[in-house]
Image (cartoon, grey):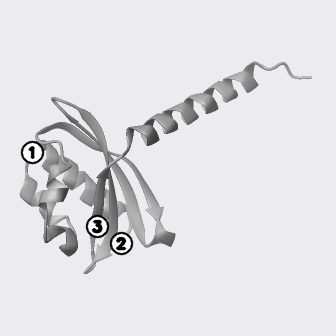
């Protein structure tokens, strides 16, 4: 399972979210999640207006990938965190959750602090 394969499958999930194609999303789930897909489907903002792959990172020593999807509906904008693993030779979603607002806010604060620090370094007089 490569990052490109996971990225393509995640993009397919995004397309399915916008199309409202729950069946195609369920096809991407692991067998474990497919046994009771209601929980996973309940997390999805359907119908979505926009959906895209925000980030993809390796996890578990390269055994899995964590993909964050940015999804907007008429009512909300959320980030879905999905974990993908190789199942029968294909990337499958083995875990799906909403990212906590606290995590999102903490990342934004850290990025702002880093930008401010970089700006401060750029303005500091050289001695």
Residue 127: which numbered mark, if any? none
Q: Picture quarter containing residue 103?
A: top left
Image quadrant in which the N terminus is located: bottom left
The one nearer the camera, 58 or 2, is: 58
Residue topped by disc 1: 19
Q: Who's the residue at 44% across and 39% down the image?
A: 102
Give percent across and percent down for residue 59.
46, 64
Q: Mark 2 points at which residue?
A: 1
Q: Where is residue 26 in the image (x, y as percent from the top left)?
A: 13, 62
Judging from the image, what secondary structure is the residue with disc 3 in? strand
Quarter of the figure with residue 23: bottom left
Q: Earlier in the sequence, mark 1 or mark 2?
A: 2
Write the residue at 13% across / 71% down. 35
Q: Is residue 7 left or right of residue 39?
A: right
SS state under label 2: loop
Judge the density around disc 3: few (<14), some (14-19), many (≥20) Cα neighbours within 10 Å: some
Q: Which of marks 3 and 1 is in front?
A: 3
């Amino acid at each position: 399972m490569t990052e490109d394969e996971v990225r393509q499958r995640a993009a397919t999930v995004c397309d399915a979210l916008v199309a409202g194609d729950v069946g195609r999303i369920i096809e991407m789930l692991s067998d474990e999640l497919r046994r009771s897909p209601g929980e996973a489907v309940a997390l999805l903002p359907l119908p979505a207006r926009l959906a895209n792959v925000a980030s993809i990172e390796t996890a578990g020593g390269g055994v899995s990938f964590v993909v964050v999807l940015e999804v907007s509906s008429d009512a909300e904008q959320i980030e879905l965190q999905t974990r993908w693993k190789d199942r029968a030779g294909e990337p499958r979603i083995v875990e799906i959750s909403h990212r906590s607002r606290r995590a999102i806010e903490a990342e934004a604060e850290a990025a702002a602090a880093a930008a401010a620090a970089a700006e401060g370094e750029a303005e500091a007089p050289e001695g």
